[in-house]
Structure formats: C-alpha cells, structure tokens
Image (cartoon, grey):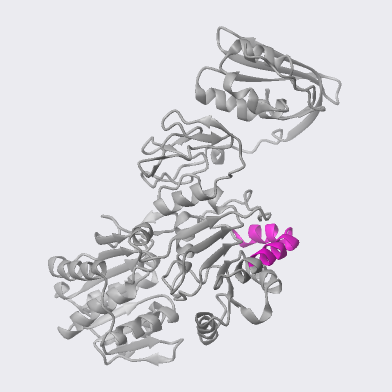
Amino acid sequence: MLSLRPYQQTVVDRLLDKLDETTNPILAVASVGAGKSLICAEVLRILSAKGWRCLCLTMSSTLVQQNNDTYISQGGLSGIYCGTLNLKDTEQNVIFGTPNSTLQAIRKHEPLSRVSFNLIIIDECHNVDSQRPESMYMRIIHHYGNRAQGCRDNFRIIGLTGTPYRGKNKAILGDTQLFKERVCNISTSWLIHKHYLTKPVFDQPKVSSLDFSKIKVNNMGKFSTKDLNAVVNKSHRLTADIMAYLVFVIESGRNGVFIFASTLQHCEECMAALPVDESACITGNTPAHERERILHEAREGKIKYLVNIACLLVGVDCPRFDTVCFVRPTESPVLFTQAMGRALRLYPNKKDALILDFAGNLKRFQDWEDPVLTQALAQTRDKDAELIFECPECSTMNSEFARRCTGFVSKKRCNFYFEFKDCPQCYKKNDIAARYCIHCKGEIIDPNSKLTFQKNAFPVTYAVMKARYYICQVKAQVQCQYTFLRPTGEIGSAAEIYILKTQYHKNIFYGKFVREAFNKPSKHYPYLLNLAYVNKMMKQIKPLEKITITEVGRSTRVVKRYYHAPQDNALSHA
C-alpha cells in the first residue's frame, strides 16, 4: 500500500469535503505525474467503506486496468466492466469501466444498467462533451442520475484531468459547463519545482527540422492528415536523418525515447530508420494485449524507441524513458505539455528529461505563459543569433526575429511585444500568430478569413524600370516608388511607405525593408530614427532588379523585392 504525498492527501480531503457540501459536479485538475489514479483510489476506498456504490470511467482499457490495479494495491475490492478486457463484473461496490462498454450495457438493459451508483468518477474528463446531451458520457450521466430519482442528493460526479480544456481550448469548468467547482490545480511546473517530476531540458538540434510552418488547422482546431502527409512525403531523407541523430543521442547514455510522428505513414518511415530489435510502434489500431506487451518491454528496457502518433499522451506509465522527440506539429501547448510529460516521471539515476523538437512547436507558440514552456523558449533561443533589439521595459537584447521580448522579470516572461495583435474580446495584446487569447481564452478571428477571393489578387513579378526613394522630414516617412512595364506595354507603378516615429515603426522598417536592401543591415539599425542618417543610407541601397506585386482593383501592393549583387559601403553616424 502506497503512502499519499502531502498534496495528494490534501486533494482527497478537499474532494470528500466537497461531496458533503454540494451536489455540483466537482473538478480536480492534476497534471501528468501528479498521481491521479492514487487520489482516485483513496477516495473510492473511503467511500466504498461507507457503502457507496461507485463507477470509475475512463476512455481506454489500459487506463481501466491501471486504475483498477492501483485501487487493489491500496487494499480495495473492485470489478472491471470492459468489453476489450472481456470482463463484465457488477457485484463489487467499485466498478472500473469504459464509457463504450457502459453505454452498451445501458442500451441492452444489462445488469450494470440497473445498478444505482452514488458516485461516478470520470478520469480524463476533458473527453466529456457536456454541450451535447446525446454524447456518450452525458447519456451515461443522465441514465444514472435518473436512477437516483427523487434522491439526487445521493448522486455525485467527480472529474479528473490534467488538461481542463477541450476542442478549441474551451474550458470545461464554468457556470454553463458540467463541472461547476474545482478543488485543486496541480500544474506540471509546480510538480517540477517541488521535485515530484524530473526537470525537462529542451533542445532544438542543428539537424534540419521538418517544415510544418505552412499548414493550417481545420475548423476543429486540428491539423489534417492530408496536409501532414504532404509535408512528410517531401521529407523522406530528412526523417531518416533525424532518426539517425536520435539513435546517436540514445546510444550516448539515455534510457529510451517517445517519438511522436505525424501520420501512420510517417510512423512506418521512422520505424524503418530505427534499430529493429529495440523499436516498436503503437497506433490506434494496436490491439490492447499487443500494446501492453510493448509497454512492458519498454519498462524492462528491451525497447528503447517507442513510435506513435498521439496514442501515448495518457495512460502510459514508463518512467524509465527520459527523452521525447517531436517529429509532428502539435495544435496547442496543452498537447505539447501532455506529450512532454511522458518523460517527466521520476526514475532512479534519471537526471533530466530531454525534449527534442524537430517540428517547430517551440517556434509555433511564441506566447506561452506556463513557467515550464517559458523555460523551453529561453533554453532553445538561438545563441548564435545577432542580438540587436533592446527591450524598453527590461533592457534584454533580442534578435531581429523577436516578436515578444525573451527576457524575464521576477522569474516571469517579460510582457513587452515588438509585434502584436489585440484580442477583439478583452483588447489585450497577443502574439501575432495566436489563435486564442492568452488572457480571456477567446478566439482571435483572422481578418483575412472574411475577405472574398478576387481573381486579380495573384502575385505578379515585373522588372523594375526605375526606383526612387524619398525621405519626408516633416512626416518622418520613407517613401519608395517603383515603375515597371506591363506585357501590354502599359507603364505601371507601385509604392511603399514606412513611418519612422517610434521604436515599433523602426522595427517594422528594419524587418520589412532594411534587412533585404543592405548587405550588412544590422549596423544601420541603431540609427533608423535619425532621418538624416536614413536619407544618406538610402542613397547607397542595393540596385533593384525586379519586384513582385499583387494588384486588386486599382490598388497595388509590393510583396517582394529582388536585388542585384549587394553594394553596401560603411556610413559614418550622421
């Protein structure tokens, strides 16, 4: 019998107190490694001794078996109701089962449907779609709630999860949600800080990464398999190179690695480049007994490379493994943290958990607020990048590509943005790539999604006949005017205007124009708000060869400039 950690005992006490105080469904948020199965087992053991009949539901047969084993190890007596495990027990006070098997029992009026449960515990309760009464979990809740008839005080619901969001990051706690009250929020960062989890070490190796930057999420907030396969199909050799590097890392003294691939086809490619005797792949099609055999061999150290798509996010207890490798993009930091957590469990002589990102996830989420993920951003910052932007709030130097300051103030991420967009709901600043506000969690609508397609909005490249550059001292502007010849013989024109009044304007001018127009742009950066200097600088710009423009109606926009061989002479400070 295991002794509960102090915080686990606190959670158990709070849950039991809340069950006495309210009939509202209760939520316990506990990250991976917090010991949700042990917390659940202790609550069930105490209530079972009082005569309560309890049903504990979770999505996979692996988690059903795992939760049942933990409960028995704590001295409890239980039954399992799971078709996949070929077990349908109903006599014990405590039953562990899957929602699929339970709903089938209700439909077929089997003995389980006639049990009057006092408590339903839902593990990984973010899977509950409480907005749809016809959904699987809600039908089960409705059925057993009705069996309580007029004695609703005898019916309770507890939810356990490490990720209290579902779908497009919509919270599962609130007045309009199933869960109305929360008793705890045990985060990954807190567990690491208290040494209940292994410290993660993040790395973005110099080995080339798979480029998923251009794929978009669909209406469900997910990446499509078609788009993922399109990237993978172009990168056969790159996948093999990444796996070769990974083998080198593991053979250099690490215990094992969880590899998160993009698609079934990608899993096969990864497996083809890994040691045959030490590798295995788990997908949604892997039979339960085969999955358990593979995980058992991984725990024993016989398997060191575990390839999967997203099947090892929950219900996997393999503390020996100390590495996670991403060769797939994740749609949200929640999923990234969940996957990362597979390697954070404590194990003898495990010094750290190495997180390798070959899919650009650390770049995709530039605006993370979680302390662990902020640490990831700091650790993977390009140490070779030239630091030229000084943050006006914390004085940290940033690279020319920084959108938000990478500095820290009182151990928290600096809040200064070089580029940002406002949330339309709460009007607070967010990263320019953010889909959901980090403050109010509302969706930030892409304004381009409301534009209608126009047939003449294609980029067209023209040779430049003449390029002229003007500095307007009064309005503090740089004006660039170009003329070109159309195939019809008509002369066309395009223009760009850059304002130079604030640090923000300076960064825009530098990032969109100066970096391309000069051979050594960084030396000009400190003086870009000095119009006299800019005027002198613009006279020594590279010769322009051609430009790419888009024309919509009568408006013309410059998309890209192409220059001849660079010419850039030293300037003295004006």
> What's drawn in magenta, residue-wise?
224-246
Q: Main secondary structure of the magenta part?
A: helix
| Residue 233 is covered by the magenta coloring | yes
| Residue 484 is covered by the magenta coloring | no
Q: Residue at x 57, y 27 (%)?
A: 508
Q: Nearer the viewer, residue 370 or 6?
A: 6
Q: Nearer the viewer, residue 167 or 330?
A: 330
- Image position of 265 with respect to 376: above or below: below
Q: Nearer the viewer, residue 438 or 403?
A: 403
x and y, in percent, of residue 14 in the image: 19, 66
x and y, in percent, of residue 61 in the image: 43, 81
Corner quadrant of residue 3: bottom left
Q: Residue at x 74, y 17 (%)?
A: 540
Q: Quadrant of the C terminus?
A: top right
Q: Residue at x 45, y 63 (%)?
A: 338
x and y, in percent, of residue 68 in the image: 34, 84
- 188 left or right of 206? left
- 11 left or right of 259? left
Corner quadrant of residue 223: bottom right
